Amino acid sequence: MTDTETATGRPRPPTTQPRRASFGPVLRAEWTKFRTVRAWLVGLFVAALLSVLFTFLVANGRHEGSCTGPPPPGSGPNSPGSNCHAGHPFVPTGPDGEPVADSYYFLNQPLTGNATITAEVTSLTGVISTEPANVAPSQTSTRRGLAAWAKAGILVTPSTNQGSAYAAVMATGSHGVRWQYDYTHDSPGLPGLMTDTSPRWLRLTRTGDTLTGYDSTNGITWTQIGTTRLAGLPTTVSVGLFVASPVSFQDSNNGSPTLATATFDRVSIGSRGGAGAVDAWHGQSIGNGSKSFYPTLGTGGYHRSGSAFVLSGSGDIAPGVGEGLLGADTAASSLPLGLIAGLLVMVVVSTTFITTEYRRDLIRTTFTATPNRATVLAAKAVVIGVAAFVIAAISAAVAIPLSEHILKANGDYVFPASALTEIRIMAGCAGLVAVTAVAVLALGAILRRGAGAVTVGIVVFVLPYTLKQVLAGSADEWLFRLTPAAGLDVLGALPRSAHVAYPYTLGNGYYPLTPWAGIAVLCAWVAIALGVAALVLRRRDA
Amino acid sequence: MTDALHAEWTKLRTLTTTWWLLIATVALTLAVSVAMAAATHLTAGGGGQDPTRLSLTGIYLGQAVIVVLAVLAVSEEYSTGMIRATLSATPRRLVLLAAKAANLAGLTLVAGVLGVAGCLVVGRIMLPTDGLNPAHGYQLVSISHGPTLRAAAGSVAYLILIALLSLGVATAIRDTAVSIGAILGLLYLAPVLAEALTNPLRRHLEQIAPMPAGLAIQATTNLRSQPIAPWPGLGVLTAWALASLLIGGLLLRLRDA
């Protein structure tokens, strides 16, 4: 019985330290064990296959298109019409290659050389569509209400094509005066709401290719709120007054288009003074047809009221987030299900990598060969972690371009992702699977029995991902903040914008944490599991 | 058959794991239902809730423990080599499987009745305070209400069928970890996959996958909008359980232990 006693490794007195086994041979031993068990290799293969297959199924199930004909006779009320073709509405691309919303009403005239444009915004009001999302918005069914980011102001742009560069100074619904250019840049001016007694004076100057915005409450004392150089600005640009009013998400998660109306008084351009000659003004509705993705309430328009211009407009000039008809498809949006399926198989492979040793009593031999148990655990963790990382990286490298290709072929709009983002998603998936595999290995070491370890592993590390549809309210947001499911936050690839009011919720495809914070939460869980496993292994007989 | 039943009963009864798992089934089922009831709030205009189904949400997690119990009943015999002794004592393998199934069904019945009854009590007490009360047009959860009785009895039957399905799969696979992984994958992945699919395919998947079809028995309102009616849904799960027992039994008969 003596050799069994040594093998079970009774706690030794602290004076006799076990001979420190070097890590290399232990690692090699564990790697040999792993690669010579065919079931585990088959398991890895199945994990990769399932994850790619499920990603394919998900991507393949999403279609975007429009139908021009009536539904075929005898079909249900919800059936699509006939004469359908795949394709999404036009999405403009901003100067930096990002998707943008660029729909507004623009009363403009060409202007050559340096100039100063001044206007006093004396009122800004709005209406919100009250039609349900599946009914086309109409001017007649609306309620009074001004979107927080309704915009009225002065805009300079080299071209009225959607997505072109611009700079603008504007009064907004409830965010005060803002200076914005090229969709993503924003700086605040005068805060507070505009009232009849406190109008907002706006001024935009052009000097070469430098544009500067000012605001004032009285038209006498001016404060600069922002400046920018729009490189390559042509000599002749379009300048003018604009009004835009974005989709409001106050009433429903689907959003309701809105329309804003603003009164501009004392409009002056350059040194000419006074209002520009009326013939020179040209009213234009930008990005406001059925072909544009951004939902609008009418096309807007303008009329003169005494010396003032009254403009109404609908739409937004801002980064395109998941609103409107864009959907939420990204390079990563089809991945979660495949990831969960692969993870499930990985959990089984990873737990059995250690529980089988207990079942077959091989663990005694292992601990006899390497008495330092933490070393064995570390070697096993490295082997299973690296194997999981590699297999998940390969699966993701196949699944991401495949799903993007299928989505695009099905006519879906896919948010553009930089190569760096795609690599981040790929590495994130691989890291997520590797880290989970290590955690489940630790669970196997703690529980020693396959049944318990696999069940706890699946319930703790896989089930939270699937609970999304069961949970109500904001509970699912917490799920993706606190539980191991936070790891899925690495898949977040939808753009957010501080100056677009949009429900950035999980239901709309926005994960609550930043990618690396999500992985950090998962790593914390893994650290706990590994710590407990190391402790338990040292304290317990095998 | 009586001897086989008795032998299997002794084996199951004398394992402390069995009792812990049964307690865990009831506890987890109740815990999830309580958490669900606590997280529910009646939103303005968000009608169409099904109080009975909400109360019975715990089955979603409770079934995982039943899966473990059923898998262990056969796979542990293989991992310890006990199966050879068992088969020497009861050479008629189908009788053995039937005895195992009967015992498991009995134990699951007890845990299921306790869990489901607890869930209904939770729903009766907690949901009215969330706004799901007669004042908002919701009936109180009550066993005297026909559809609720169907949902309650059906949920117990659901758990029993899940146990039988697991027993069949485990008999075929013989390995604990792989069996549990395969069954939990079959149960939990199908609804998530359905969620991601578009309609003709999604509806079909929800009609044939064991968990969505089986849990259709919990619906008490809006029956027409369900992908599958309650009893046919449970019928689909029964078909799954029978098929798995059949395959398991066949393999048990044909293979050496």
Image: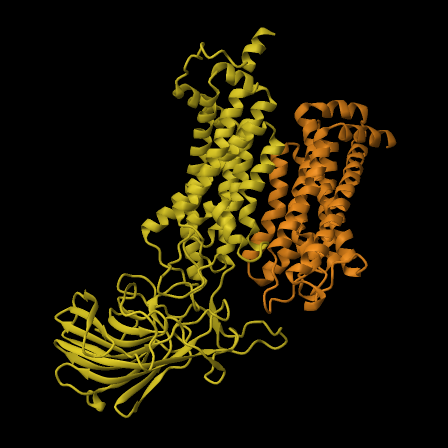
Q: Residue at x 62, y 33 (%)?
A: A452
Q: Residue at x 58, y 6 (%)?
A: A2
Q: Nearer the viewer, residue A428 or A186?
A: A186
Q: Is residue A242 left or right of residue A380?
A: left
Q: Position of residue A230 (x, y in %)?
A: 19, 66
Q: Residue at x 21, y 72 (%)?
A: A214
Q: Residue at x 17, y 82 (%)?
A: A269
Q: Is residue A94 left or right of residue A538?
A: left
Is residue A200 visible to the viewer in this orientation of the structure? Answer: yes
Q: How many marks?
A: 0
Q: Position of residue A536 (x, y in %)?
A: 53, 25
Task: Classify the position of the N terminus of chain B by image quarter.
Answer: top right
Is residue A101 visible to the viewer in this orientation of the structure? Answer: no
Q: Is residue B10 left or right of residue A17?
A: right
Q: Position of residue A284 (x, y in %)?
A: 30, 82
Rendered hue of chain A is: yellow
Task: Classify the position of the C terminus of chain B by image quarter.
Answer: top right
Q: Position of residue B74 (x, y in %)?
A: 71, 32
Rendered hue of chain B is: orange
Q: Nearer the viewer, residue A415 or B248?
A: A415
